[in-house]
Amino acid sequence: MKLMQQLTALCFVTMLLCTSSLAFGPAGQAPAGKPPALGDDLAVELKVPLFADEFADLPVASAGGILVALKEVTPKLEKNSSFLLWESATSGADLTVQFNQALSARLQELTTEPNLVVQFTRGQIDDQQRLAIDVPLFSEPFAAVPVATIDGVPITVDEFSDDLQAVHSEASGNHAHTGMRDNIQKLMERLITVRLVELEARNIGFDQTPSFQKQVANHAQKTLLYGLLNLQAASVVLDEAAVDDLYRQISLEGKLESYRFSNDADAKLLLQKVNNGEQFDNLIAAAVKAGKAVGGEEQDFTRFKDLLPNIAKAASNMEIGEISEIFRQADGFILFRLIDRRFVDDPQALQFARNNVWDTQRARAGTEYINQLIDQYASFNQDAQEVLDFAAIKQTDPDIKLSGALAPLLKDQRALATVSGGDPGQVMVAEVAKRIEETFFHGTDVILKPAEVDQTKDEIIQDMLFRMAGTLEAKKQGLDQQAGYLNEVEEFERRTLFDIFMQKVITPDVRFTEEKVRAYYQEHLEEYQTPAMLKLQSLPFYQQKDAEDAAEKLRKGSDFKWVSANSEGLVDVQDKDLLQFDQKILSLTALPQTLQSQAAAAQRGDTLVHAEPNNFYYVLYFENVYPPQPKPYDQVREEILKIVYQQEVESTLGQWVEKLKEAYPTEIYLVGQGG
């Protein structure tokens, strides 16, 4: 059951690629830069009912900055035509002519300058009397235009573009931009699915359950408080001096003279003697000569960000010429002398410093503002505060356990604090004690640590009071009436109802057999194979010509050992930079990436030359090739089960969507990509 629930959640995430971000982001968010924006000129093509009231205000052109709405043109058109006693809808061809004539006449009334005219439609009308128009996705005059309607409720261009931007923001770069343009239609289908499911979920009554309403109330409050904090933090100005100071602390590079010891005791003894006043140069020279240490070669400057964090931190705080502490690594024990250190320009480090300072400033400003609101709205009961003083409780009974300290408090119904200014709210002693108890996941049968518990208590009280005082202040400032807040709460309801519908309706309908899982395995055998295995012999050369000569001899049938013994320009096999090909059987995927495609096509007895960039040329002789083998069914069954289950979930959901489209009339005006 747990696996099925996880898979349902996975499907839910897949379907909700169009989720929108919080209307009010978390306070303290770093100014790391906005994600790559979609082009301002991105448009979609709609086919809209020519005479429908909901499209009457649709801009079809502009002249000198003056928009021309559809309703300014349609009165000139003949919706129906008559012949003798028969009346019928005017054909698309006739309406196209009439529309273009009427639009041209209206534009000429507004301007005689053709270069001031912009048309959003090519004036093509089909026999269903639908006008084709290119609608910009990020233009305010088009924000309220429906791209679809479900049960009479529109999905507007504004909503569609927000979801498109949200999906785009999860990706990056030019590939993501192209993907958005190619997948606009798929996004529309997802939007339709989610809206239909929302309607059905509300009709079933899922929105009336206490659990749903509690989720929405909590999210609405959180969104409101984020909005309040972000509004307050908008006045924060980045401290450029602090940025520069931090930047110069972190963007450093140094020249290190490092030594590696194989024995920890030798390194510690040397460091002890240095601390006792003996000369490091003499000690380290003796250690190297005795084979106890290696290193000491002159090194170039190394950026501290490329060092291990503990070494970089040490080098940042050392004096020039100082000897470091000992650092344990996989190949031994390291200590080093700092030869030199200097600042280096690094755009990434500068951005990190800006983000770090920005985070700190906003967090500090947020904390100060929260405390200010609590002081403004809340009044405290001094007696109740005293009973929650865990330091005093510990002083009275040094051996008391946390459970014993909490026991009387859990029954204390006194108000610790009262928030006024709207609907009065109170924080009760028992409620605070209960929340403290809940934070100790492993139980409260432990010795009381007053500093830890008092800190937890203060955080709980601050959170509870800010929720009440902050909500009052946010509503006082009208944040609960802003479109961003209302849209976010509405979208959260929609996502939550979709999730509930998936769990309670779709999942129970999913049925499939073991035979179906096995059939998927058989149909996709090539995806579930072990990599090819290879037995290679290799000859490394300094020069490509020598490698090619040796390879040609092998292709002509020469014995490998003879070629190895009679070739010029071979690299010494003891060279530490050599790639090892012929020590054991290798999997295809273990080979260098640039070699894998060639090796995949090789057969037993083949020879090829592989060049490593800035390195050597390898003649590779394929002594044996073991082709890929299907992995056993039992080995991949769990992986395939997840795939088949998700496919069945999506199939079941698709069947439901088709039924829901019949129950809730659905009109889709989006026909493809434009602009």
Image: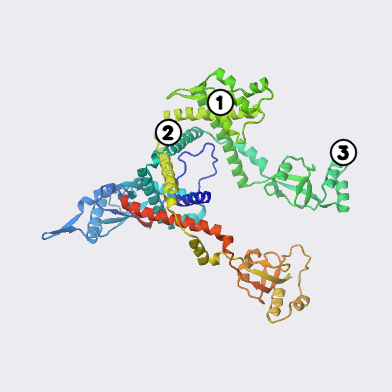
The residue at the far top in this view is 383
**Mark 2, residue position:** 479
Left or right of 40? Residue 270 is right
Residue 530 occupies which quadrant of the picture? bottom right
Which residue does the image show at 55% across and 40% down from the upper left?
A: 30
Give the vertical position of 90 relative to 432 (above or below). Answer: below
Residue at the extreme left: 84
Query: Which residue is depicted at the point 43% across and 58% down?
Result: 182
Comparing 360 with 501, the one in front is 501
Q: Secondary structure at mark 3?
A: loop
Q: Position of residue 115 (x, y in %)?
A: 33, 53
- Looking at the image, residue 608 lies above or below residue 60: below
Residue tagged 3: 276
Question: Which mark sits nearer the N-terminus, 3 or 1?
Answer: 3
Determine the secondary structure under disc 2: helix
Residue 37 visible in the shown view: no
Q: Residue furthest bottom?
A: 556
Specify the amino acid type for callout 2. Answer: Leu
Above or below: residue 192 compared with residue 370: below
Please, what is the three-letter code of the amino acid marked with disc 3?
Asn
Going from N to C along the chain, the mark reached first, 1 or 2, is 1
Marks 3 and 2, how far apart at CA: 67 Å
Q: Position of residue 201 (x, y in %)?
A: 38, 45
Quadrant location, the C terminus: bottom left
Q: For the residue marked with disc 1, what is the amino acid?
A: Leu
Q: How many C-alpha atoms fall within 10 Å of the one at disc 1: few (<14), some, or many (≥20)?
A: some
Q: Nearer the viewer, mark 3 or mark 1?
A: 1
In this view of the protein, which residue sits in the foreground, 467 or 64? Answer: 467
Can you see residue 303? yes
With 518 as the anchor, is 539 left or right in this view?
A: right
The residue to which callout 1 is attached is: 410
Q: Identify the residue shown where x is 71% and y is 77%.
A: 549
